[in-house]
Image (cartoon, rainbow, N blue to C red):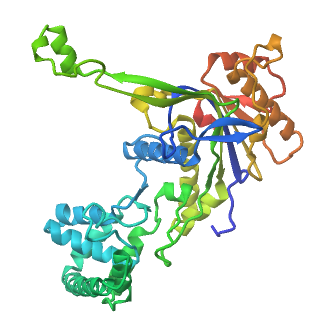
């Protein structure tokens, strides 16, 4: 299968979803407030695509690792700054290395490959890469296996590398007496120092371990790694939009008071003589912002890009085809079921199910956000409103789809799924929606 090969059906699978959320906070800004956008002249609540994509990726990975779903048992990736620590852990647990040496060696090997690490003087970040790296979950184990296999050579090289680093850092500190920025001086000295080159065989092994290989979620969501020029970047096969409310946003600042159990137990058992001087009121008080609304969100799967990514990672034509079909089924399931986990215990947000999911194929992506440019007016219908946002949004979305479908011959017949009995009844009353009802998420893919 060449890079020009394509799936049997249309290239793009478009997914559109409406969901109603009540008193939740799945994503926040730097001040802990809900995120929002202005659209159609009104402010809307927003759930970022980054939060959604991570929730979908982790949902699929957890299912695969537990032997469930279309990707059961298949490889996935991890996005982390802790690759040196993961490699060191494998060296100690699988190969019997001493912890300190394992960490030093793992960091040296990964750093010499091209990744920058945090300030060695700061213990919390010294062994963390400066950027998140999305790589196959077993990359640390593979790097550790190579290090142990080439232990004699790598130990000798690492000793020279670390000694050269230490000497360069000392030289940098001396030069920093004439500089106002210590860290920049240290880094500049180390980068300009002639550090011993890492053995070519080891560098190749690290690059192979960090390459996308058979990690399905990297093929789906892509990755960008500028630090190592010869480690392949991946243009993801999934496009995701930010979710936004189909109506004007209304934020609630919820005042909460947390009780002090010990204090209340004393009062309950009449142990007032133990009361402290300031023993009145709640143990802690504060505010948390909560949002409520019906959200529209959208995602697209590029089937051709997915197959190309898998083949570029080393799969054969047949392997890429079979894996792509499984990945599409699992992606659709995650799009329907996954939810960001912020405040999940205090709001039970992860139990939400969509009011409607619309899926269809086409020769290009189709985003239906324009259907909600004019915010839904939830006033009663007899007062010139559209009624509750959920049913009103369903009517708008399906009307928009039917209208576009009549003008775009590449759009194939859509499929709709609902988990809301009221919406199910509504679908029975609508005509010419351009979509056929289904009862399971798996049926949303052609």
In screen coordinates, is 439 left or right of 366? left
Q: Quadrant of the C terminus?
A: top right
Residue at the location (34% across, 74% down)?
Answer: 110
Residue at the location (56% across, 45% down)?
Answer: 331
Q: Nearer the viewer, residue 323 or 50?
A: 50
- Image coordinates of residue 51 in percent, x first then y, are 52, 45
Residue at the location (59% across, 56% down)?
Answer: 321
Quarter of the image for residue 222 reads bottom right
Quarter of the image for residue 183 reads bottom left
- Image coordinates of residue 297 in percent, x first then y, are 65, 39
Q: Is residue 104 above or below residue 263?
A: below
View extreme (front): residue: 277
Q: Is residue 101 above or below residue 366?
A: below
Residue at the location (40% across, 73% down)?
Answer: 115
View extreme (bottom): residue: 194
Q: Nearer the viewer, residue 303 or 231?
A: 231
- Image coordinates of residue 68 in percent, x first then y, are 42, 40
């Amino acid at each position: 299968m060449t890079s020009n090969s394509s799936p049997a059906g249309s290239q793009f699978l478009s997914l559109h979803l409406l969901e109603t959320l009540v008193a939740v906070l799945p994503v926040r800004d730097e001040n802990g407030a809900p995120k929002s956008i202005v659209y159609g002249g009104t402010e809307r609540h927003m759930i970022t695509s980054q939060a959604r994509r991570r929730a979908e990726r982790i949902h699929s990975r957890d299912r695969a690792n537990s032997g469930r779903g279309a990707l059961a048992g298949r490889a996935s990736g991890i996005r982390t700054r802790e690759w040196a620590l993961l490699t060191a852990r494998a060296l100690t647990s699988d190969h019997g290395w001493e912890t300190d040496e394992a960490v030093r060696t793992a960091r040296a090997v990964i750093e010499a490959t091209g990744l920058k690490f945090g300030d060695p003087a700061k213990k919390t970040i010294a062994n963390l890469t400066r950027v998140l790296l999305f790589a196959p979950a077993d990359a640390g184990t593979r790097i550790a296996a190579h290090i142990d296999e080439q232990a004699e050579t790598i130990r000798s090289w690492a000793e020279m590398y670390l000694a050269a680093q230490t000497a360069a850092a000392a030289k940098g500190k001396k030069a920093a007496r004439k500089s106002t920025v210590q860290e920049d001086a240290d880094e500049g000295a180390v980068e300009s120092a002639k550090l011993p080159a890492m053995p070519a065989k080891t560098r190749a092994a690290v690059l192979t371990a960090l390459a996308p290989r058979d990690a399905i979620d990297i093929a789906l969501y892509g990755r960008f790694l500028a630090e190592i020029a010869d480690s392949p970047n991946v243009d993801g096969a999934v496009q995701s939009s930010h979710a936004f409310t189909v109506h004007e946003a209304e934020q609630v600042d919820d005042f909460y008071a947390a009780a002090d159990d010990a204090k209340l137990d004393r009062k309950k058992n009449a142990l007032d003589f133990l009361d402290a001087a300031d023993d009145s009121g709640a143990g802690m008080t504060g505010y948390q912002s909560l949002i409520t609304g019906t959200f529209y969100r959208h995602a697209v799967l590029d089937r051709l890009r997915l197959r190309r990514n898998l083949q570029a990672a080393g799969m054969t034509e047949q392997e890429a085809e079979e894996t792509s079909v499984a990945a599409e089924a699992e992606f659709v399931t995650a799009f329907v079921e996954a939810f960001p986990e912020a405040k999940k215990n205090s709001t039970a947000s992860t139990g939400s199910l969509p009011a409607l999911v619309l899926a269809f194929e086409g020769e290009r992506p189709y985003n239906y956000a324009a259907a909600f440019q004019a915010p839904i007016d939830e006033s009663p219908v007899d007062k010139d409103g559209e009624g509750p946002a959920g049913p009103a949004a369903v009517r708008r979305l399906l009307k928009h789809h039917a209208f576009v479908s009549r003008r775009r011959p590449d759009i194939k017949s859509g499929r709709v799924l609902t988990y809301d009995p009221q919406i199910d009844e509504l679908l029975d009353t609508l005509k010419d929606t351009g979509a056929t009802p289904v009862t399971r998420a798996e049926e949303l893919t052609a």
